[in-house]
Amino acid sequence: MRRAHSSLLTALPLIGALLAAPASQAADPVVHIGYIPVLGAAPAYIISQEGWDKQAGFELKLTQFDSGPNMILGLASGTLEAYMGGIGPLMVAGSQGITVKVVASTAVEELVVAGGPELSAEAAKGGTKAEAISRLAAKLGRPVKIATQPVGSIPDTVLKYWLQEDEHVDAAKVQIVPMGIDATQQALLAGAVDAATVREPALTIIQDRLPTVKVLAYGKDMIKDQPGTVLGVTGALAKDHPELVQKLVELVDKAVTLIAQDPARAAADVEKVLGRGIVDVKTMQRALTSPASQFVVDPRRIVEKTKTLQDFQVKTGVLKKAEPLDTLFDASYYEKLHK
C-alpha cells in the first residue's frame, strides 16, 4: 500500500500537468480559396502540393469552380476567404458591395482565341480576322459561334473587346456562346463551336488532339498586359488576418519563381491538381512554358489595363459605373515583399 501510495503521489504532478494542457494542439488556420482550373492558378496548386502553406503555419484549402462569377457567391456567403481567377468578376463584386482586395497577380495575357479548323483555314487566307469571320459566316449561312465564359468574366470581356474595339467585327456575324471552361474545350474539339477563348493547358491539349486548331490571337495581341488570373482576398481576411495574406502573397511569389527556375518540378505539382491523371507531366510542362503562359505577381502591372476593361464593361452595360481601382487593388503586401 505504501509503495502504491508513493507511486500515486509521484504521478500526481504529471496528471495535473496533463489536465492543465490543451486536449490537442490548436489546428492551423484555414484559408479557403476558390480557383478556376486553368494554368494561371498554378501557384495555388504548387503551394498545396509542396506543403508550403503548412510550413508557413496555415492550411490552404482549394475548391474548384467553373467560372469567376460562380466564385463570387462563395465570397459573398463567407464560404471562401480567397479567390484565384479572373479580375472581371471582382470588379462586378465591388459594384455590388462585396469587398474583395486584389493583392497579387499570377498571370497576364493568358487568354487566346483559338480558331476551329474552318475558321483557322479562312484566317490563313489572309486579310483581317473580321474578314475571315465574315467569309466563314457567309459560307455557313449563320453567325460564327465563339465559346467563352459567362458574362462579366474576363474571357467574355476580353473577347468582346477584341471583336469590337480591335477587329471591328460585325456583331451580326458572330454568336457568343457562354459556357464553363471544360465545356468550352470539349465544344471546340467536337466542332460544336467555330472558335473559343481558351487558356493553358487547354490550348496545348486541344492542339495536340486537333492540330488544325490555330491561335487567331494571343493575349498580347488582344490587350497587352491583359489582366489574367489574380489572387483576391476578402476584406474580412485582410482586416482580421493580414499576416495570413502576407504569407499567401509570399508563397505565390515563391511558386512563380519555381515555375521559372524549375518548370519540371512545377509541372509535376500542377499535374496532380489540374491534370487529374488525364494530362501527363510532359504536356503540363509544355503548357507552363508556352507563349500563352506569362506568370507575373506584381499587381501594379495590371492596373492600367484593368481600368481599360472596366470602362469597356460600363460601355457594354455589364457594370453600371466604374469603381475607383484603388479600392480594388492593394499592392502593399507585394511591396513589402520586394521593398
Image: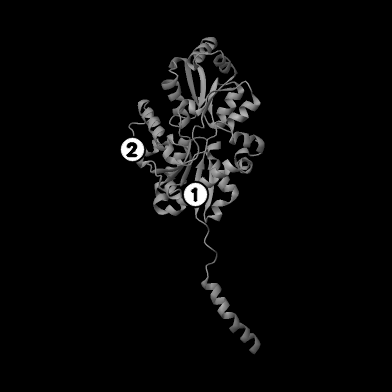
Task: Give the tally of numbered discs.
Answer: 2
Residue, x 45% and y 19% (percent of image)?
A: 167
Q: Is 282 situated left or right of 238 in this image?
A: right
Residue, x 39% and y 38% (percent of image)?
A: 93
Q: Amino acid at mark 1?
A: Glu
Label whose residue precedes the other's in the sequence (1 or 2):
1
Q: Kindly identify which numbered label has been placed on residue 324.
A: 2
Which of 139/269 is in front? 269
- Relative height, residue 92 to residue 130 (above, below): below
**Residue for badge 1:** 250
Q: Quadrant of residue 279?
A: top right
Q: Spatial distance from mark 1 to mark 2, Cα to Cα?
A: 26 Å
Q: Amino acid at mark 2?
A: Pro
Image location (x, y in percent) of residue 181: 54, 31
Specify the quadrant that holds the N terminus.
bottom right
The residue lying furthest to the front in this view is 339
Image location (x, y in percent) of residue 87: 44, 36
Q: Quadrant of residue 277?
A: top right
- Relative height, residue 305 to residue 266 (above, below): above
The residue lying furthest to the bottom in this view is 2
Image location (x, y in percent) of residue 4: 64, 85
Q: Is 52 situated left or right of 101 in this image?
A: right
Q: Nearer the viewer, mark 1 or mark 2?
A: 1
